[in-house]
Image (tube, rainbow, N blue to C red):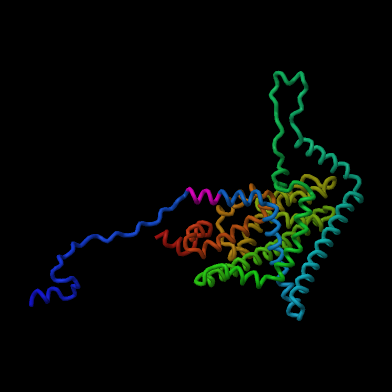
């Protein structure tokens, strides 16, 4: 009886000996192969480097589609077909670009024709600058024996125009942008639904949320830069008008929008007022121009950008700086413009993928909770 009570719950036959309690093997954690990760990153960088023209054309078309989406939605609410609303939106954009180019060309021609007294000085200054950036290896046969040869270095303009072999390639790539923007506007609902459908059923809600956050981030980035450029350009126009700079309206808004270029903006913003003011500016005026451009650039980066874009981007300065260096190396000047939205989009994706969340935390700003916990 005691033996039967002891064997309650034990399904072994009575004649079978008891098995020893062996340790249950635990599954080993999956080893991270960093070599494969490095090869994958190198492959992505190679694709970005060699596919610059195609990728830049697609990304610029995406940005234009986000700009034109509210206009197309407005025409759609007026009971117009989606394709017609998209075509009208793209046509309005092309008309606006043509008008801006026409106005800029007229201003440039007026600058060279109505101010002949210092147009010669402009040509002389430009020729002096370009002559210094040309080939530095100018040695006579008698000097080559004992002289140290100085070879031509890469011009900084080659870096900014990296990837664009000729004007024909630029025009050919640019001709695709209106058509891509039109089809993105026409098929945006289908493209979004089809993109979400590529993911497994359990991940589709997260994918839909990620795409929505990326859309709002890109739209906020474009609208925020437009508002900041108009504000800085308006203030610059008033300052340049007060200093008596000719064509102050053109120079002011050109300086305002050039100031938005990361890192190089503070230098590029100086060029329009200094160029149109040659022959009219005194040294105190030059100092005031440099001081105003520097002040407006600092205000736009440290005050206006966090106000308009800080809630959407949420990138720390170190990540932004590294992103600017990498994308400038890959795509030149275009990389400087697209680096911030690309990095912000990558952060949003990593915030919604469990295995990539540590990388998203590294790219992002320090949250108040983390900072409070770290100080305890």
> How many numbered marks are there?
0
Q: Is residue 2 left or right of residue 168?
A: left
Query: Which residue is pictured at 89% across the width and 52% down the height?
Result: 109
Quadrant in which the C terminus appears: bottom left
Q: Is residue 207 above or below residue 174?
A: below
Query: Which residue is pictured at 51% across the width and 49% down the height?
Result: 38
Q: Is residue 148 left or right of residue 350?
A: right
Compare residues 71 and 198 and report the one nearer the observer. 198
Q: Residue 290 at x, y = what percent? A: 72, 49
**Residue 130 picture quarter:** top right
Q: Is residue 214 above or below residue 79?
A: above
Main SS class of the magenta portion in the image: helix
Query: Any magenta on residue 39?
Result: yes
Compare residues 82 and 296 and report the one nearer the observer. 82
Q: Is residue 75 left or right of residue 40?
A: right
Q: Residue 144 at x, y = what percent? A: 73, 21
Quadrant in which the N terminus appears: bottom left
Q: Residue 11 at x, y = what percent? A: 19, 73
Q: Residue 346 at x, y = what percent? A: 57, 59
Whether residue 77 is visible here, answered yes or no, is yes
**Which stretch did the figure color magenta?**
35-41
Query: Which residue is pictured at 74% across the width and 20% down the height?
Result: 143
Query: Any magenta on residue 116?
Result: no
Whether residue 265 is visible here, answered yes or no, is no
Q: Is residue 267 above or below residue 57?
A: above
């Amino acid at each position: 009886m005691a033996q039967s009570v002891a064997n309650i719950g034990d399904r072994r036959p009575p004649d079978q000996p008891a098995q020893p309690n062996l340790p249950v093997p635990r599954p080993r954690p999956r080893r991270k192969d960093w070599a494969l990760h490095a090869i994958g990153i190198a492959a992505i960088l190679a694709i970005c480097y060699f596919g610059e023209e195609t990728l830049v054309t697609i990304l610029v078309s995406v940005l234009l589609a986000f700009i034109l989406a509210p206009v197309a939605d407005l025409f759609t609410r007026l009971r117009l077909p989606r394709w017609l609303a998209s075509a009208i939106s793209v046509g309005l954009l092309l008309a606006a670009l043509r008008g801006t180019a026409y106005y800029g060309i007229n201003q440039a021609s007026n600058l060279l024709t109505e101010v002949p007294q210092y147009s010669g000085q402009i040509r002389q200054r430009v020729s002096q600058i370009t002559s210094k950036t040309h080939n530095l290896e100018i040695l006579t046969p008698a000097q080559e024996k004992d002289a140290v040869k100085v070879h031509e270095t890469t011009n900084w303009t080659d870096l900014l125009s990296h990837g664009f072999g000729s004007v024909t390639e630029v025009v050919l790539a640019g001709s695709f942008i209106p058509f891509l923007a039109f089809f993105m506007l026409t098929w945006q609902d289908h493209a979004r639904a089809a993109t979400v459908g590529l993911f497994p059923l359990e991940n589709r809600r997260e994918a839909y949320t990620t795409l929505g956050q990326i859309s709002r981030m890109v739209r906020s980035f474009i609208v925020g830069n437009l508002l900041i450029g108009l504000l800085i350009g308006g203030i610059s126009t008033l300052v340049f008008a007060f200093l008596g700079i000719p064509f102050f309206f053109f120079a002011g808004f050109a300086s305002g929008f050039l100031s938005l270029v990361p890192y190089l903006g503070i230098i590029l913003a100086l060029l329009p007022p200094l160029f149109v003011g040659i022959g009219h500016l005194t040294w105190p005026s030059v100092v005031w121009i440099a001081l105003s451009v520097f002040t407006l650039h600092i205000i736009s980066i440290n005050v206006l950008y966090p106000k308009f874009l800080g809630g959407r981007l949420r990138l720390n300065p170190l990540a932004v700086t590294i992103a600017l260096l990498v994308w400038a190396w890959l795509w030149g000047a275009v990389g400087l413009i697209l680096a911030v939205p690309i990095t912000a989009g990558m952060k949003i994706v990593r915030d919604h993928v469990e295995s990539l969340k540590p990388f998203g935390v590294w790219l992002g700003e320090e949250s108040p909770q983390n900072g409070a916990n770290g100080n305890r």
